[in-house]
Image: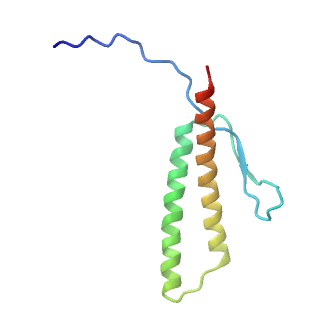
């Protein structure tokens, strides 16, 4: 059985980009210190989110092992992990909203 050649030209669909989102409210007062800029490539955002998520995992495991061995844990270490987790989460949400926005286009 023969298969016809693919004669369709590649799609010139517009690349999906991140939504703008603000984050980083250390005092929980509604003031955001950082933002994800609109227009950044979605795949770059997801790649950064995955890298940061892996880093949080590694750092949290090291911190847990240190505490388990009787070492002190410092508040700054825990807050740094929280900030990294928030960055990763915000990148993932900006990607999610961008994909939802792209799906709503006609």
Q: Is residue 47 left or right of residue 5?
A: right
Q: Give the residue drawn at x 54%, y 87%.
A: 71
**Residue nearest the viewer, comparing 59 with 96:** 96
Q: Give the residue drawn at x 26%, y 10%.
A: 4
Q: Which residue is the extreme one toward the bottom?
A: 70
For the rendered model, the colour scheme is rainbow
Quadrant in the picture for residue 104: top right
- Indicate the position of residue 46 as horizontal and vertical percent values: 53, 45
Quadrant in the picture for residue 78: bottom right
Where 80 sits versus 103, above or below? below
- Indicate the position of residue 89 as horizontal and vertical percent values: 61, 53
Where 68 sits versus 40, above or below? below
- Indicate the position of residue 5 as horizontal and vertical percent values: 28, 11
Q: Give the residue drawn at x 63%, y 32%.
A: 101
- Indicate the position of residue 92 as horizontal and vertical percent values: 58, 47
Q: Give the residue drawn at x 50%, y 54%.
A: 51
In which quadrant is the N terminus drawn?
top left
> Exactly how many numbered labels are in the figure?
0
In which quadrant is the C terminus drawn?
top right
């Amino acid at each position: 059985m023969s298969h016809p050649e693919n004669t369709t030209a590649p799609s010139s669909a517009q690349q999906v980009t991140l939504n703008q989102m603000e984050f980083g409210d250390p005092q929980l007062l509604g003031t955001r210190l950082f933002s994800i800029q609109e227009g950044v490539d979605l795949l770059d955002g997801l790649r950064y989110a995955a890298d940061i998520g892996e880093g949080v995992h590694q750092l949290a495991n090291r911190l847990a092992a240190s505490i388990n061995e009787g070492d002190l844990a410092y508040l700054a270490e825990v807050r740094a992990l929280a900030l990294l987790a928030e960055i990763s989460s915000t990148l993932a949400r900006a990607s999610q909203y961008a994909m939802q926005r792209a799906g709503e286009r006609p």
